[in-house]
Image: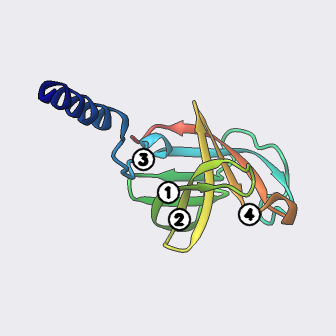
Amino acid sequence: MKKIITLASLAFCVLILVCCKKHSEVFSSSIAGSWELRKVTGGFRGIYPGNDYAPGNGNTWIISNATYQTYHNHSLIHSGSYSLGKDLSPATGQVTDFLILNANEKIYFEVQNDTMTLYRGELAYDGTIEKYKRIEDNR
């Protein structure tokens, strides 16, 4: 009987170790790189009045492991540090990665192959979807 209890306890411990993942906030470096705007859809677009953008348009993000820079028409408009997280996106209704820029602005994003999609705000309230193409891999 003692042998059965020992084996059952051992099996339970192994099961716990195999099934439980340690929660850690390790994020993919897939967002690191240089990205150029290709398309904007959604509400009020401010400085991006059109829908489609040709290569070389100068509307870019340069993202390293801890900092970012954004350019409009080749001129720097924002820079600083960022952190990453995951939360329910109001735009997609799904758990999505997000950037927190300079500790206050939250932008949800997805990266698939060479395309980065940014979800700004809620689409019903003039939010936008911005699609960027990777132009350089800084990872």
Q: Which mark is residue 121?
A: 4
Check contact, mark 2 vs mark 1: CB within 8 A. Answer: yes
Q: Which residue is mark 3?
A: 27
Residue type at mark 3: give it.
Answer: Phe
Residue at (60, 49) in percent of width and height: 96
Question: Which one is in front, 39 or 118?
Answer: 118
Gap in Å between the C-alphas at discs 1 and 4? 16 Å
Spot occupied by residue 34 in the image (x, y as percentages of width and height): 52, 45
Instruction: Specify which label sits upstream in the sequence, 3 or 2.
Output: 3
Residue type at mark 2: give it.
Answer: Ile
Mark 2 or 1, closer to the camera:
1
Position of 30 with respect to 7 (left or right) is right
Q: Which mark is residue 85?
A: 1
Gap in Å between the C-alphas at discs 2 and 1? 8 Å
Check contact, mark 2 vs mark 4: CB within 8 A. Answer: no
Gap in Å between the C-alphas at discs 3 and 2? 13 Å
